[in-house]
Amino acid sequence: MTHPYARELGDFLRARRSRLRPGDVGLEPGGRRKVAGLRREELALLAGLSTDYYQRMEQGREVRPSDDVLDALAGALGLDDEERRHLFTLARAARRPMPAPAGHEPERVPDSTRRLLQVMGTPAVVLGKHLDLLAWNPMAEALLGDPADYPPDRLNMLLLMFEPSMTDDGRCADWEQQALDYIGMMRTAVATDPTHPRATAIVGELSIRSAEFRRLWSRHDVRERVSGTKTFRIPEVGDIVLDWDTYPLPGNPGPVMLAFTAEPGTPDADRLQLLATLHASRTSR
């Protein structure tokens, strides 16, 4: 049986190799090429490895690379700091014996965190390590919609991103970047437990029903903690441009709090406050 971490390591290496072109690393393109990106033998040469050894790594076969080998591969592939950490996480896990099936306790949000959400004056949610929506505040409900409209097992940011209403032609311009951010966070979570049933269920479902998800997932991008800017199109108040950031909560890896904020005194802040007022008036009726 293939070690799950070795398989994930091989997939990551193959994805990173395929994004490099010969000219990126000072090689001549040569004649007609059958593969996207560098050939295995070219990457092995750049990293100072034998082609057979590198090929076995990509195939997830019984290989336990040293840290020196990983350093050489990271340099040859041009990995950034986040990708390099991901490479080492997978490889070091692959050196250990096959993991025994682990118990998976339900993720819980401390009461103190729930109280904090309620007093925050900005939209905020708590996401589990596989992007399940665990808690939210009224401001988030005003901005994102009522989570009660979805069955509990569908309350997952990655599943929601690939709902037909989000992926049709009328989607917002930054949809793909946000999808990549969530996919990158899921990739990072998978690196800590490739066989977790929740991750397997989410990735499996989306892989079956969405060609777009398959394309983005195959990139093997990783994100640890992310931030960005998103435009919300709200018919009642107009477009609202908000910054969003994630903050880690206890656990390894534990849930994260995702908060949306606007610069005080800006039209976006005014629209957000108007939206909150409208939502509060609706829910009080």
Image (spheres, rainbow, N blue to C red):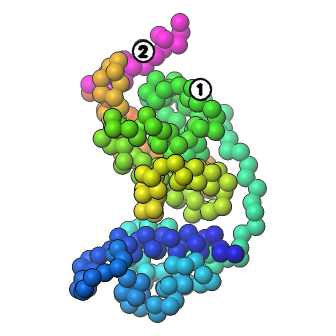
Residue designated by label 1: 148
Q: Which of 49 and 258 is in front in this view?
A: 49
Quarter of the rendering containing residue 99? bottom right
Residue appearing at x 42%, y 43% in the figure: 245
How dense is the environment of label 1, judged by Cα within 10 Å: few (below 14), some, or many (20 and up)? few
Q: Is residue 24 left or right of residue 221?
A: left
Q: Where is residue 42 in the image (x, y as percent from the top left)?
A: 36, 86
Residue appearing at x 71%, y 45% in the figure: 106
Mark 2 or mark 1, whichever is nearer to me = 1
How dense is the environment of label 2, judged by Cα within 10 Å: few (below 14), some, or many (20 and up)? few
Q: In which quarter of the image is the N terminus?
A: bottom right
Q: Is residue 179 left or right of residue 3?
A: left
Query: Magenta segment, which residues?
Result: 267-285
Quarter of the rendering containing residue 39? bottom left
Q: Position of residue 145 (x, y in %)?
A: 48, 26
* Three-letter amino acid code at the position of disc 1: Ala
Please give the label number shown on residue 277: 2
